[in-house]
Image (spheres, rainbow, N blue to C red):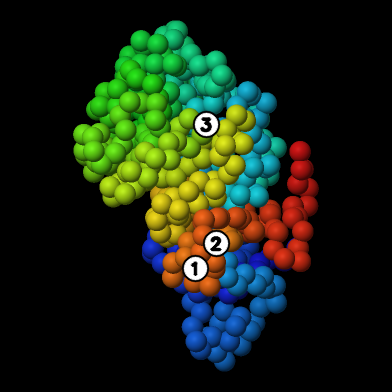
Amino acid sequence: MTAGFTLRGGLVCDPEAGTLRPADVVVRDGRIAAVVDRTAGSDGDGRPAGEHRTTPDPVIDVPGLVVTPGLVDLHTHVFVGQDLGVDPDVVGPPSGVTTMIDTGSAGGHLFGAFLRSTVDVVGPRVRAFVNISSIGTTSILLSGELTNLDYVDVRVCREAVEAYPDQIVGVKIRASHNVAADNGTVALDRARQVADATGLPLMVHLGPQPPSLPQILDRLGPGDILTHCFTALSGYPLTAQGRAVDVVARAQQRGVVFDVGHGMSGFDRDQARAAVDAGFLPDTISSDLHRYSRDIVVDLPHVMATFLAMGVSLTEVVRRTTVVPATVVGLDRLGVGTLRPGAPADLAVLRVTGTGGPETAGHPTGVPTVTAVLTVQQGRIVHRTLPGHPTSYPEGHSTR
Ligand SMILES: [Zn+2]
C-alpha cells in the first residue's frame, strides 16, 4: 500500500477558484498534498523543470480528462433495505460521487435504523436530512407521511437531531398535496420550528400544490433549500414569461438554495432550459437517485451533462456538484468538495465530451457526456476504468 500518488496531466477544475487548467494533483496519506500547475517549463512529473524528483509515489496519467473534487450529491436516497434506498457503494464510486446526502428517507423514529443500514458502507461519505415526519418517506409509491399530523412531531424530530448531531445535516419535508393532503402549511411550520431550534437548513420538496410556491418560499431563509426546483408539477413554471421567475429570483437573492433533485418527476427539461436561458441557474445540481428513479436519472454525471447541453459551463456545473452542496450541509468546513491542500483526497476524474467549447478543446462536439473513469475516496481508488485497467475496488470492498 503506497502512501500516495499523483494524477498527472489532467485538466483540473478547481470549483473554489473557478478555474479549469492543466495541473497535477498530488495525493498523500489520504489527503490532497498539492495542486501543481503544469506550465511550458514543467518536466512532466508535476514539478518545475530541474526540480529533483524525491518521491517514489506512483503516477497515474490522466491526459485529456477533467479532474474535480469528488462529487457531492445533495439529494439521494440511500437507506438500504428501505423501499427507496440504493446502495451507496454500488452507485457512488462508478459515478465519481464521494459524498451522498440522504434527503428524508428516515424520520426520527427510523433514524437509528437508517444509520444501521449505512455501517457497512466503505465508499461514499453519507449524511442525511431527517424527515419532519417520524416515519420518513417510507415509499414514493405510497405518499402520505404528512396526512396524519401525529407523525409530524416536532419533539421526535428534535430528539433525533440531538441524538445524531454528526450525521444529521438538515430537516426535510415533502410539502405537497399528494404527501400532505391539506396539512402542508401546518407541517411546513413544524419543520420550520425544528430547523430554527437546531440551526439546521430546511429542505422542502416542490410538488403538486398546495402549498403554493410563494407559500413555501415565504417560509425559507438563507441556506434553506427548495428541491425539485424545475418540476412541472407545481403549476408555477419557472419561465421567463411568468412572475414565478421574479418570486424565485428574489428568494435566490436572499440566499435560498435552489436544488435540481432530478428524480422521476422532479425535473422538467423544458422548464429548466427556459430558466437557464433567462439567466437563472440552480445553486446545486443533484440526482434524487433512488430505486425508482435510477433508470431515468442514471447518475449524477448524467444530470451534469444535461446542464452542459443547456450551455452552462463545465466550471459552473462542477461548482454546483462539489463545493456548493458541501457548503449547504456544512461539510466544506472539513474541506469536502474542494481541492484545498489538507482536504480529504476525494477526487473524480471525468471524461467530458461534446461541449465543443474551449474548455474541452480537442474533444468532439455533439451531445455532451460526462463519465467518471476514476474515483478516489480519501486517498483510496474505489473505481477505475482508465484504459488498460479494469474496474477495481480496494481490498475488503464488498461488491454487493
Ligand atoms: Zn427525493
Q: Who's the residue at 66% across and 78% down the image?
A: 55
Q: Toward which corner of the image does residue 214 lie, by quadrant?
A: top left
Q: Earlier in the sequence, mark 3 or mark 1?
A: 3
Looking at the rendered image, the quarter that the N terminus falls into is bottom right
Which residue is tagged 2?
353
**From what the image shows, is residue 37 above or below residue 220?**
below
Cα gap from disc 1 to disc 2, whole angstroms? 7 Å
Which residue type does callout 2 highlight? Thr
Which residue is tagged 1?
360
Which residue type does callout 3 highlight? Met
**From what the image shows, is residue 302 above or below residue 181?**
below
Rendered location of residue 142, percent (x, y):
55, 15
Please say if the residues under marks 1 and 2 sit with CB atoms less than 8 Å apart. yes
Q: Earlier in the sequence, mark 3 or mark 2?
A: 3
Q: Nearer the viewer, residue 67 or 158?
A: 67
Report helix, strand or loop for mark 2.
Answer: strand
Residue 372 can be seen, yes or no: yes
Q: Residues within 10 Å of mark 2 (few under 14, many from 20)?
A: many
Q: Who's the residue at 58% across and 87% down the image?
A: 43
Q: Toward which corner of the image does residue 56 lie, by quadrant?
A: bottom right
Is 181 left or right of 388, judged from the image as shown?
A: left
Is 221 left or right of 101, judged from the image as shown?
A: left
Q: Toward which corner of the image does residue 112 lie, by quadrant?
A: top right
Which residue type does callout 1 highlight? Thr
Which residue is tagged 3?
264
Cα gap from disc 3 to disc 2, whole angstroms? 25 Å
Rendered location of residue 131, percent (x, y):
47, 24
Number of callouts? 3
